[in-house]
Amino acid sequence: AARLLRARAPHLMREVAWRRAAALAPGDTRAITRNLGFFPSNVHSVAARDTSDAPTVLQMYPLSTSLNGSPGRRAVTRGSGPRVQPWTTLFWLVCPTLRSKISKLEAVGFIPYLQASISEHPALMHGMVGAHARYADARWTSLVESDQELACEIGWGGRPRGTGG
């Protein structure tokens, strides 16, 4: 598996960089870095913008590489080269105002309340299961074919099962 990763890692980064270059507007890199404190290596595109055209949601490439830092629990290291790991967040909220408001909802227990409400209504539960399946399918189909093959060969499985992997 390590030899396979060494051979394919440069392709992954070239592909992500090419797709990013075609998808970002001038100033997006600076705005994203300002909002997050860094620029993620696996940004694919801006999925949503606010009324001033600033990025609010990013679409991420489902694999991430890094040259340093923690490899993560599912990362595969290639000697001294970059590490590749699944990136389960397909859409990443980068607007500081929206992130703050959602954090406040999470802090007061809104997520468990929402989960309990959904579990009490079969139609809502069915809709959530379908949404998770569509999300997983969107993550899988956004991978280039060689990265789908890589994910299968490494043992990360075929199509992801839901929002978290």
Image (cartoon, grey):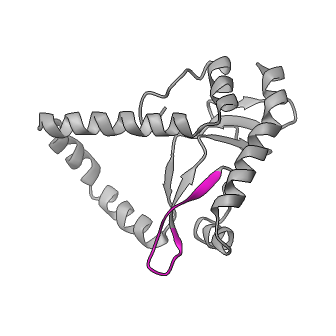
Left or right for 36, reference 114:
right
When the figure is inspected, residue 107 is found, relative to residue 68, above or below; the finding is below
In which quadrant is the N terminus drawn? top right
Rendering coords of residue 127 (x, y %): 23, 39
For residue 25, what is the image quadrant?
bottom right
When the figure is inspected, residue 110 is found, relative to residue 12, above or below; the finding is below
Q: Find the magenta span and give its range.
A: 43-55
Could you say which is closer to the camera, residue 157 or residue 70? Answer: 157
Q: Residue at x 52, y 64 (%)?
A: 94
Left or right for 55, reference 147:
left
Whether residue 34 is visible to the viewer of this picture, yes or no, is: yes
Rendering coords of residue 9 (x, y %): 79, 35
Rendering coords of residue 11 (x, y %): 79, 38
Q: Is residue 53 magenta?
A: yes
Q: Residue at x 34, y 64 (%)?
A: 104
Q: Residue furthest right?
A: 80
When the figure is inspected, residue 127 is found, relative to residue 45, above or below; the finding is above
Q: Is residue 36 magenta?
A: no
Whether residue 66 is visible to the viewer of this picture, yes or no, is: no
Rendering coords of residue 61 (x, y %): 61, 45
